[in-house]
Each structure stands twice: as C-alpha cells, then as structure tokens.
Image: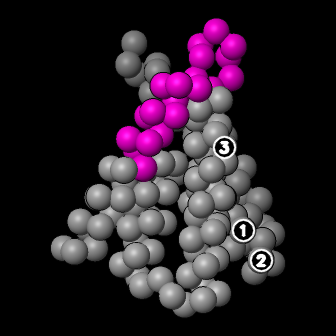
C-alpha cells in the first residue's frame, strides 16, 4: 500500500507540473505543443538522472525510485519511461525489440488517438 501511495503522490505532483508547463508554453496558434515537448524532454532527462544515479550510487531506495521515477516522471510524462526503456533495449543490444517497440509505439499510439477521436464523434 505504501508503494501505491508513493506513486500516487509523485504522479500527482508530476501531472500538476506538466499542466502548468502546458498552460504557459502550449499555443494552438503555432501548431507545436512546446509545453508537451518540453515536459517529454525534461521528463526523459529526469528519469535518466534519477535511474542513472540510483544505479551508479545505490543511494536511492526502491521507495524513493518509485516516488521520483515511476510517480513523478510517470505523471509528468510517459515519454520518459518510453525513452528509458528504449535506452535499456539499445544498451542490451536488442536492436530488433528496440525497432519493434519504437515503431509500434508511435504507429499504434497515433492510430489509437485517431480511433479514439473517431469513437468520440
């Protein structure tokens, strides 16, 4: 139960921060959602730092990692986890899984958005 609460708290903070970044940086007039882009890139950097630090120094507990990486970065952006998982696949030399996972995530993600929009009509 404690682990669920840590993810919940971290995710809440991450989601609120992403909301504020999007509110101030996303502008429908220019077409590019700079706030979302910034959240994705910052979240990717943060999850890399958090998990890299945890692995290198072994100073973060599993609960701290859940709060910061799974919770905060997961709430801030799911792209951070996607980027980290791709890093793991590349580092392990599993290029086929990397290619399938990356391409399928983009293609199916876009298709799911379009299909969801279609269903909502």
Query: Bounds of the magenta span?
Result: 14-33
| Quarter of the image that includes the C terminus | top left
Measured as percent of width and height from the top left, residue 90 is found at: 78, 71
Q: Earlier in the sequence, mark 1 or mark 3?
A: 1
Residue 91 tag number:
2
Q: Is residue 5 above or below residue 32?
A: below
Image-based side of 76 in relation to 7, left or right: right
Measured as percent of width and height from the top left, residue 89 is found at: 71, 72
Residue 111 seen from this side:
no
Residue 87 tag number:
1
Residue 10 seen from this side:
yes
Question: Marks 1 and 3, Cα distance to the nearest angstrom?
Answer: 16 Å
- Classify mark 2: helix, strand or loop: helix
**Of circles 2 and 3, which is in front?**
2
Q: Residue at x 53, y 25 (%)?
A: 24
Question: Marks 2 and 3, Cα distance to the nearest angstrom?
Answer: 21 Å
Residue 106 tag number:
3
Query: Which quadrant of the view contains residue 8?
Result: bottom left
Measured as percent of width and height from the top left, residue 62 is found at: 41, 82
């Amino acid at each position: 139960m404690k682990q669920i609460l840590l993810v919940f708290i971290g995710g809440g903070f991450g989601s609120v921060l992403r909301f504020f970044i999007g509110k101030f940086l996303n502008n429908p007039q220019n077409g590019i959602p700079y706030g979302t882009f910034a959240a994705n890139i910052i979240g990717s950097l943060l999850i890399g730092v958090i998990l890299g630090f945890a692995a290198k120094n072994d100073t973060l507990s599993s609960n701290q990692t859940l709060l910061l990486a799974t919770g905060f970065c997961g709430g801030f952006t799911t792209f951070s986890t996607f980027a980290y998982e791709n890093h793991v696949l590349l580092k392990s030399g599993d290029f086929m899984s990397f290619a399938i996972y990356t391409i399928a995530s983009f293609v199916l993600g876009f298709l799911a958005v379009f299909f969801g929009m279609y269903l909502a009509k």
